[in-house]
Amino acid sequence: MESTDVSSAWSAFMDQARSRAAAAAPLETRGSLTRLAGLVLEATGIRVPVGSQCLCGDGAGAQRWPKWLGFRESALF
């Protein structure tokens, strides 16, 4: 395979990947903040992997991007 063939095939692949990524809808899950203690936010009703970032809004337009760090054992039951 010539280098121009590889280059054009790679360019076509990347163009398709960009268009698929742009069209993808983000996954969304919602929960409710139940407690705020210092820099710790506690929430219920949200199931995301540890390490995920979550967008938190206050209803007045302010938004924050906290990181999901863990869970409380009592929340498992």
Image (tube, rainbow, N blue to C red):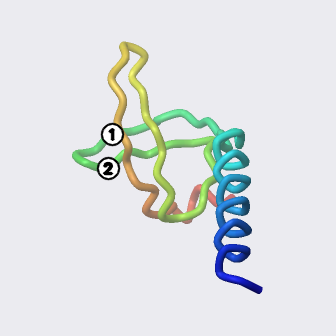
* Distance CA(mark 1)–CA(mark 2): 6 Å
Question: What is the secondary structure assignment of the residue under circle 2?
Answer: strand
Quarter of the figure that contains the C terminus: bottom right
Q: Tell me the amino acid under the disc marked 2.
A: Val
Coordinates of residue 22 in the picture (x, y in percent)? 64, 42
**Which residue: 70% across, 77% down?**
6
Coordinates of residue 26 in the picture (x, y in percent)? 65, 42
Q: Residue 65 vs residue 22: left or right?
A: left
Front residue of 77/18: it is 18
Question: What is the secondary structure assignment of the residue under circle 1?
Answer: strand
**Which residue: 58% across, 37% down?**
31
Front residue of 72/13: it is 13
Is 7 situated above or below 42?
below
Is 13 situated above or below 44?
below
The furthest residue to the top: 60
Asked if disc 1 and disc 2 are in contact, CB closer than 8 Å, the reply is: yes
Q: Which residue is labeled 2 in the image?
A: 40
Residue 13 marker: none
Q: Residue 16 vs residue 70: left or right?
A: right
**Which residue: 46% across, 51% down?**
53
**Which residue: 33% across, 23% down?**
62
Q: Residue 51 vs residue 65: left or right?
A: right
> Which of the 4 image quarters holds residue 44?
top right
Q: Tell me the amino acid under the disc marked 1.
A: Leu
Q: Which residue is labeled 1 in the image?
A: 36
Coordinates of residue 56 in the picture (x, y in percent)? 43, 34
